[in-house]
């Protein structure tokens, strides 16, 4: 089945509906010259605010509050269109993209192609990770972790063996970057709040351990903020272990490089990414799993092809960066999208493009309820001010006033009332009478 624009209409196809792809589409839709349109293709119908996934794990918000429908982000009367589909092939000679959609396989013609499909979680970093660890990359991952935590609490109440109870109540987070720090803090707070509803579970049977193979947490931030994050987490009774490298994961433990073993039935992995499978099929130059790009975000040796976001290795022409690759963060993805919108318009108009240059405006991380660390320019914050700035920033990024209001209400509710302990497992009518399956243990 073919899906092509009007013969007189030309098309920019954007593959990927994350921060980079949606920002680019919205930046282009009102500014494209007559006869051009932007077509955004994404496997999901929504954009996930990945930095907020830890809040789903900790039940600070529900899953629907960390996603935004792509169709609501695009203007119905703008020069843009959304197609929900999975891109499985690109024919650069014929300039077509093949996508699996709800209406079957479609071949989408393009005049300019932009790759913004991000990365995938890499569970091949160590033995046992794929079989026994829970990744945190997608909103479904966050919900799975939340459900697993609640299952563990329910299981402990029914368990009589003391060692088994301690193993079930020990939650290990691998990775001391932003995701690892945030999920460890949220998890510690969630366990503290939920334990009230599990009277047969003792406080000393629950603990969270954060493993980081570096000398300080949050290596992207100044050392003082990394140390502040350590202090904040330890104040929440999180066992922060620095210079502790995980070597293997089993069903019952995490093995460390120094030969020690930590008993645990629940391991959360926040490290490691791998390229989207489509990258390998394109035959492009790859460096550390990312598509090598020119400074203007075009792909060398590939006419009409551009890339940005996590899947792209984009040199940063800012003086402070000295052409080092831009980090794979939401802030830089948004900045790249805005520059690429200008470059695409310049390219269509026969004007020269410009190099991507962006200086970080700051970085932030939460370490639990009402606590965080932040760097804004040369200023550094920790505690409540950093936590408030983190929330204000991501509230501002939410599209539409309605979604902002819903998120603000949910955050306010979570500040005033106890942790929600709903196990969000939805059973359909066809499944209700199926043989009972024991909760995962």
Image (cartoon, rainbow, N blue to C red):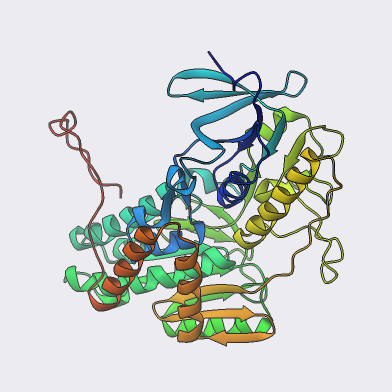
Foreground residue, 181 or 151? Answer: 181
Residue farthest along the left direction in this orientation: 433
Residue 306: where, in percent of width, then height? 74, 40
Q: How many marks?
A: 0
| Left or right: where 29 falls relative to 183 | right
Residue 236: where, in percent of width, then height? 41, 81
| Left or right: where 222 falls relative to 263 | right
Point 44% across, 67% down: residue: 395
Question: In the displayed structure, would residue 329 be above or below residue 192?
Answer: above
Whether residue 339 is visible to the viewer of this picture, yes or no, is yes
Residue 202: where, in percent of width, then height? 24, 74
Foreground residue, 319 or 189? Answer: 319
Foreground residue, 8 or 197? Answer: 8
Point 23% across, 62% down: residue: 421
Point 24% across, 65% down: residue: 420
Whether residue 42 is visible to the viewer of this picture, yes or no, is no
Residue 90: where, in percent of width, then height? 68, 25
């Amino acid at each position: 089945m073919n899906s092509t624009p009007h013969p007189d209409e030309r098309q920019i196809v954007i593959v990927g509906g994350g921060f980079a792809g949606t920002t680019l589409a919205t930046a282009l839709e009102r500014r494209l010259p007559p006869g051009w349109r932007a077509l955004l293709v994404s496997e999901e119908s929504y954009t996930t605010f990945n930095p907020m996934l830890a809040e789903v794990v900790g039940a600070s918000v529900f899953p629907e509050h960390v996603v935004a429908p792509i169709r609501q982000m695009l203007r119905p009367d703008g020069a843009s269109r959304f197609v929900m589909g999975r891109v499985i092939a690109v024919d650069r000679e014929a300039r077509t993209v093949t996508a699996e959609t709800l209406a079957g396989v479609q071949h989408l013609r393009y005049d300019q192609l932009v790759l913004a499909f991000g990365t995938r979680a890499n569970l091949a970093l160590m033995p046992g990770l794929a079989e026994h660890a829970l990744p945190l990359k997608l909103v479904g991952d966050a919900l799975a972790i939340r459900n697993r935590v609640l299952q563990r609490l329910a299981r402990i109440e029914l368990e009589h063996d003391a060692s088994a109870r301690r193993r079930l109540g020990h939650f290990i987070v691998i990775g001391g970057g932003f995701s690892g720090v945030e999920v460890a803090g949220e998890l510690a707070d969630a366990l503290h709040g939920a334990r009230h509803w599990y009277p047969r579970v003792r406080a000393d049977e629950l603990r969270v351990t954060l493993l980081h193979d570096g000398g300080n947490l949050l290596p992207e931030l100044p050392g003082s903020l990394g140390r502040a994050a350590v202090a904040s987490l330890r104040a929440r009774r999180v066992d922060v272990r620095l210079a502790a490298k995980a070597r293997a994961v089993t069903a019952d433990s995490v093995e460390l490089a120094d030969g020690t073993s930590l008993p645990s039935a629940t391991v959360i992995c926040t490290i490691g990414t791998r390229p989207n499978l489509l990258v390998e099929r394109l035959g492009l130059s790859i460096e550390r799993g990312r598509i090598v790009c020119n400074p203007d975000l075009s792909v060398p040796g590939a006419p009409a092809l551009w890339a940005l976001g996590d899947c792209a290795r984009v040199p940063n022409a800012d003086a402070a960066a000295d052409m080092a690759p831009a980090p794979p963060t939401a802030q830089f993805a948004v900045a790249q999208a805005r520059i690429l919108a200008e470059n695409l318009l310049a390219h269509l108009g026969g004007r020269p493009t410009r190099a991507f240059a962006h200086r970080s405006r700051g970085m932030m991380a939460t370490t639990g309820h009402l606590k965080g660390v932040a760097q804004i320019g040369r200023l550094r914050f920790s505690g409540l001010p950093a936590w408030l700035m983190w929330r204000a920033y991501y509230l501002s990024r939410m599209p539409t006033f309605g979604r902002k209001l819903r998120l603000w209400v949910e955050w306010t509710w979570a500040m005033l009332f106890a942790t929600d302990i709903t196990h969000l497992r939805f059973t359909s009518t066809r499944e209700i009478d199926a043989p009972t399956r024991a909760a995962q243990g």
